[in-house]
Amino acid sequence: MNKDLFFAIEQIERAKGISRDTLKQAIEAALLSAYKKNFKGPHKAVEVILDPATGEVKVFTRKFISSESGEIIDIDLYEALSNQGLNRVGPGEIIQVEITPKDFGRIAAQTAKQVIMQRIREAERSLIYDEFLERAEDIVTGVINRKEGKNIIVDLEKIESFLPSNEQVQSENYRIGARMKFYIIEVKKTSRGPRIVLSRSHPGLVKRLFELEVPEVHDGFVTIKAIAREPGARTKIAVESRDAKVDPVGSCIGNKGARVRHITDELRGEKIDIIRWSNDPKVFISDALSPAQVTLVELDSNSNTARVYVPDDQLSLAIGKEGQNARLSARLTGWRIDIKSDREIREVPSHS
């Protein structure tokens, strides 16, 4: 090996952030293993040293100077003086004796290259892991790469990620080559590198899409207070304004519905109801049942139940197809909702 190796180490240190001392120690450890694997001779008290000044690799063993040769690591005084060119050694001292094999340079170069490449891969994996760890619970854009059983592999440019079947939306078509936005739900470090788990069904995807599309949400003037979602079908989102001059619902809808339409397009046609948040449960529950009109809301705090009355012709709209509107409204508000028609008002005593 030569000084080009250390030039490469310096380049790696600057580009990948790997300490040259760390890399040097890793190379020396690998070279020691290579020596023990490929060469006969003393394997005890052996050390491999990579010389930064010359780029040379040398193998040394430590030997104990004695007047009579004993163990394999012993060396007598005459040999120490003649072979090492030393003139100040004596019995009882320990010295280093070079035992570098003739063919060790070729093996050393191959081993060093392997170690460097391995450390580069490890460093790159670590950087990718750190980057995506910071982006957990955030949105990324990826391309559908392939399918593995029911699961989907997504290319995020720097790394392949994983969209499990239980995080997919059944109504969506995950076509190979399609570009989509995904929500990161897990970043995990494994022996094969970072494992990035994505979702298309998580409510956080809707929240992040509004933050991307609506400046008032991104800047904090409008706050998303609650989300209830049935992926691929419908989402209800409750918003509140921190500025009296800012209409939270209008901001999210946008001019002629442009903002919410962009989000709906990204969610492949999923309907979105934007509700104004209210600290008054009766008002909030009434608004949450939109687009149905509500006549009366009665609350039973003990059972956390809201009895809601709607006009007769609004009953099916309030309940929704297969109970979806009522179900999402209950999840959004945190109240159990019992929907009745107006004609039942007089039949049930008030609890308000």
Image (cartoon, helix red, strand yellow):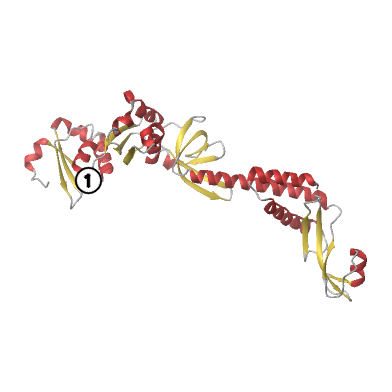
Q: Which residue is at the far top?
A: 256
Q: Residues within 10 Å of mark 1 (few under 14, many from 20)?
A: some
**Residue 202 visible here:** no
**Residue 74 visible here:** yes
User: Residue 61: where, in percent of width, then height?
Assistant: 81, 64
Name the side, left or right, on which 351 lies relative to 43: left
Given residues 341 and 165, the one toward you in this image is 341
Q: How many marks?
A: 1
Name the side, left or right, on which 21 lies relative to 241: right
Residue 322, above or below 83: above
Residue 58, above or below 243: below
User: Residue 225: where, in percent of width, then height?
Assistant: 31, 42
Question: Badge 1 is on which residue?
Answer: 336
Residue drawn at the location 17% of the way across and 31% of the way down: 314
Residue drawn at the location 78% of the way across and 44% of the way down: 4
At label 1, which amino acid type do we have? Arg
Name the side, left or right, on which 217 lies relative to 41: left
User: Residue 45: where, in percent of width, then height?
Assistant: 77, 66
User: Residue 237: where, in percent of width, then height?
Assistant: 31, 37
Given residues 237 and 211, the one toward you in this image is 211
Q: Which residue is at the far left?
A: 346
Residue drawn at the location 37% of the way across and 30% of the way down: 264
The picture quadrant where one finds residue 254 is top left
The picture quadrant where one finds residue 203 is top left
Residue drawn at the location 73% of the way across and 44% of the way down: 8
Q: Secondary structure at mark 1?
A: strand
